Image: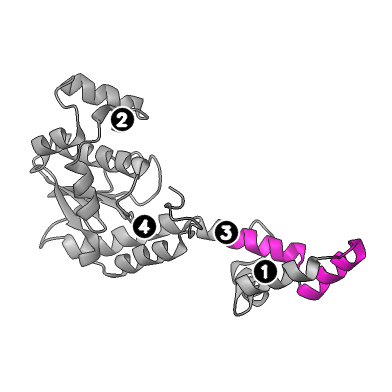
Amino acid sequence: MSDFGVGIIEAMRLLSTFGGESLGSRIADLEWQACGCDRSACIELLADSGVTAQLLAAACAVKSAVGQINVVVHTLGVLLVVPKILEEGERVEYVSLGAGNTGRAFDLETDRRVAEFKFINWRGGAEAIRQNSLFKDFYLLAEHESPKRKELYVLDPTYPRQFLRGGRAIASVLSRNVKLKAQFEGKYGGRFAKVGDYFRFRQHDVRMIDAATLVPELRAFATAMDDDEPQSQSPGKAGG
C-alpha cells in the first residue's frame, strides 16, 4: 500500500480504465461534456465518468513510484554491468548503489579499478546540470591518486565526449559547486579556462565506456525516456 491509500497495481488498473484506449480522446470528451454544466450536472458528470478522489490518489501513487525509476535503473544497471567487467580474480571492494551522498568516493571500487556510472540520456542540447555532474565525475576520477584503472560508464559517449572536448568555461561548470571549485582552483589556479583544456590534459587518465554495449537494455531505457519527453507545440525545443 502506498502513502496515498492505494496499491500501485490497483492504481495502475484504475488509471488504465480511466484513460481507455486514448487518454487524449477521453480528456477531450470530458471537456465537451462539461460545457454548460451547473453544479449538480458537474457532480453527475464526475460520477458517470469515474472521476473520484480515489482516482486522483491513484495518479499520485503512480507518479510517486515513477519518480524513483531513475534510482532503480541506476541500481540495476550497475549491478548488471559489474559482473560483465570483472576480470578473472578481480574482487569488488565496495559498490555504491544509492542516490546522493553515500559516503563512498565512487560508484564502484575493486582491487583493480575505480568507476562511475552515468546512465543519462544525453540529447546534445543545453544540458548544463548534466554537464556539471559529468565533469565532476570525470575530474574526481582523473585526480584520484591511485594506480588503479579509472573508468566512466555512460550511455553513448558521443555527447559526453563532445562536451568534455568543448569550450564551456570551467568557471561556469563549477559555479554551483563551491567545494569542487575551491578544490580545482587550489590545484590548478587559472591554468585551464575551458573544459576542453582540462580534458586534453587528463583525457588518457580516464577511460569512457558505453554501458549499453554491456547491458543493451540500458539503451531501451534511454529510448523510453525520449518517449516520455513532453512534445512542444512550437518549433522550439520543449523543456530543459
Q: Which residue ends up furthest to the front in the rendered image? A: 235
Q: CA distance from mark 3 to mark 2?
A: 33 Å
Q: Could you say where residue 183 lies in the image, as x and y percent from the top left? A: 25, 24
Mark identifier at residue 75: 4
Mark 4 crowd level (few <14, some 14–19, many ≥20, 10 Å Cα)? some
- Tag 1: amino acid: Ile
Label 4 or label 1, whichever lies nearer to me, is 1
Q: Is residue 25 above or below residue 189?
A: below
Magenta stretch contains residue 205: no
Mark 2 crowd level (few <14, some 14–19, many ≥20, 10 Å Cα)? some
Q: Are marks 3 and 2 in contact (CB under 8 Å)?
A: no
Q: Are marks 3 and 4 in contact (CB under 8 Å)?
A: no
Dot 1: element: helix
Q: Residue at 20%, 66% (x, y): give it.
A: 213
Q: Could you say where residue 48 lies in the image, as x and y percent from the top left? A: 81, 75
Dot 2: element: helix
Q: Nearer the viewer, residue 47 or 7?
A: 47
Mark 3 crowd level (few <14, some 14–19, many ≥20, 10 Å Cα)? few
Q: CA distance from mark 1 to mark 2?
A: 43 Å
Looking at the image, is mark 1 or mark 2 earlier in the sequence? 1
Looking at the image, is mark 2 or mark 4 earlier in the sequence? 4
User: What colour-coding does the image apply?
Assistant: one colour
Please give the residue where the numbered disc 2 appears in the rendered image: 172
Q: CA distance from mark 4 to mark 1?
A: 36 Å
Q: Which residue ends up furthest to the bottom in the rendered image? A: 21
Question: Magenta segment range?
Answer: 36-63
